[in-house]
Each structure stands twice: as C-alpha cells, then as structure tokens.
Amino acid sequence: MGIAEPVLSAYEDRESHEDHDDVRNEYYYGHRTVIQYDENGNCQFEYRPLTPDDFLDPEEGDIYMQGDLHTSDVIRLRGIFRYHLKKQKNIRVYCDLKIIWGIEGLSNPAPDISIVRNVKNPEQDRSAFHVLEEGTKPFFVMEVVSPKYRNEDINKKPDIYKKAGVSEYIIADPGLKKGKVSYTVSGYRLIGNRYIKIQPDSQGMIKSMTIPVLIGTAKSNTRLVVYDSVTGEEILPDDKRAEKEKARAEQEKTRADSAEEELIRLKAKMKALGISMD
C-alpha cells in the first residue's frame, strides 16, 4: 500500500463541506475503487465512499483525505527512523503498510509508521505484513493525526494496538485549526496486558523505551522533532541531512584549497630565500 494520495485538503473542517453537493459530502472520508466485470469481460469501475471504520481496516488502493501536511510529516518520519536504525540488522521501518494481526475480530490498520525487528526477508516487497506468516510483529507504531480521522487515531487505535501486543504507540497531533498547527505528542506503553499513557517530559518530549529516540516538537510547536536519546543530537530528515552533508563537504574542500594555497606560498617564499623544500 502506498501513501494515500491527498485529494481534499486536511485543513478544511467537515462543517465547511455541509453546504456543498451530496457527492462531496458522501466522499468526505475518501473512496474505494471497486472493479467489476460484465458478462462480456469488460471492466467497469465504481467508487464507494469510505467510512471511519474503513480507515481502521483499509484495502489496497483506498484513497484517503489526509492532506499535504500529513503526507510530508510521515515521509520525514520514515526517513528519520530508517536512517537512525539502518545499522540494526533485520529491522524494518514501514510506512502505510497494512498489518494483518491474524487475531479474529481485530481490525488491521495501516499505521503511518511501524517498526518491526527480526524480519526474515527485510528487503522483500510487501503489500501487507502478515504477522502469523512472518513470525514477528511491530513493536513500535506511530500515527500522525489527520483531522478527519482524529477519533480513530486517538480513541480507537490504542485498543487495537494494545490487543495486538504493540509495545509502544506514539501519537503526533498537529492540532490543525484554520490552517495553523500546534503539535503535541502523546503515547502508550504496554505494561503486562495494559496500555499505560506516556506523559511527555517538561520539554514536551517522549522517550521511547524500544528505540533510542526522543520524540517531540520544536519550541514553536510548529514541527515534529526526533532526537538521539544517547547523544542528544537531533536526527535530521533526509533533505536536511543532505544539505548539512553538502555544506560540510564544501567546508572541507575550502579548507583543503586554503592549505594547498598556503603551501604554494610557503614554497615560493622558501625558494626566494634559496631554501629547497624537496
């Protein structure tokens, strides 16, 4: 399952759609493409409106109304976690991959971020992750709240992930109101068979007990940040890390060029004094 394509902006409140035509209201949560064939084998496409319950048990190809901000956050987080955990063998960071628990009656969401260890074939392409077949399951799940699915992320998914035995569930809520963001981070930790709410520290950060990170918000609360809990350094997303590495390479080249120029000047000076440096 790929990251759901945003169709309507997540900044818009549901009330803003009430005066629109019935089609817009009907497809407020998104749509599912249903392919049918007639008696002649011709393919016909139909679109079925999605419901909040579908969000908890999606099918491949479902289109959700997540918005650009949500998609951007999830891609950034995926890059951060993959970079930070890249040296750990047989561990995978998945994005928007449906997890099939194999537990009767339990919904099978596609978490924004799910992290799994002891993956037998980590490079294998998967359209879904079948826990019973894989012999392992996510120990860490993170969801970035979308306004349209707020109730599902905050109130319903904790029970799903608790019953599935996910050790940590982190919730990042942009707090979207009229296009403005004010992030908060909360979460749950599995203790026995109970989910205990994780309280952020005085800086609004949550320390994970399953991976060496601190997750929280920048001082302005306008963006999510992830720190290495061992070094205390921020783990940069892919684009910022590439910029930093490029700047470092340019600085090193400048220093090397300066050293070479200084050596040339020194040789010229020594030669003028009749001193050979060979």
Image (cartoon, rainbow, N blue to C red):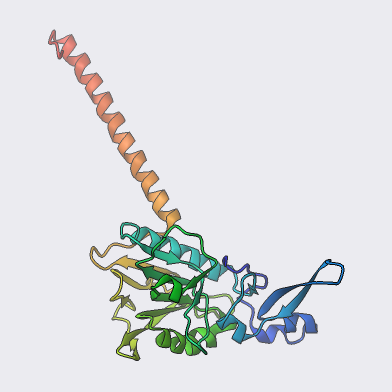
Q: In this view, does 151 lie to the left or right of 222?
A: right
Residue in the foreground of this view, choosing between 130 and 243: 130
The location of residue 265, given as percent across then percent down, is 24, 20
| Image position of 182 with respect to 268: above or below | below
- Image quadrant of residue 91? bottom left
Which residue is depicted at the point 48% across and 81% down?
A: 102
Q: Is residue 222 visible?
A: no
The location of residue 39, given as percent across then percent down, is 86, 72
Q: Which residue lies furthest to the top in this view?
A: 274
| Image position of 234 with respect to 196: above or below | above
| Image position of 32 with respect to 250: above or below | below
Quadrant holding the C terminus: top left
Which residue is depicted at the point 36% across and 80% down?
A: 168
Q: Is residue 63 left or right of residue 90?
A: right
Which residue is depicted at the point 57% across and 67% down?
A: 1
Residue in the foreground of this view, choosing between 72 and 15: 72
Residue in the foreground of this view, choosing between 212 and 218: 212
The location of residue 11, given as percent across then percent down, is 61, 76
Which residue is depicted at the point 61% across and 75% down?
A: 59
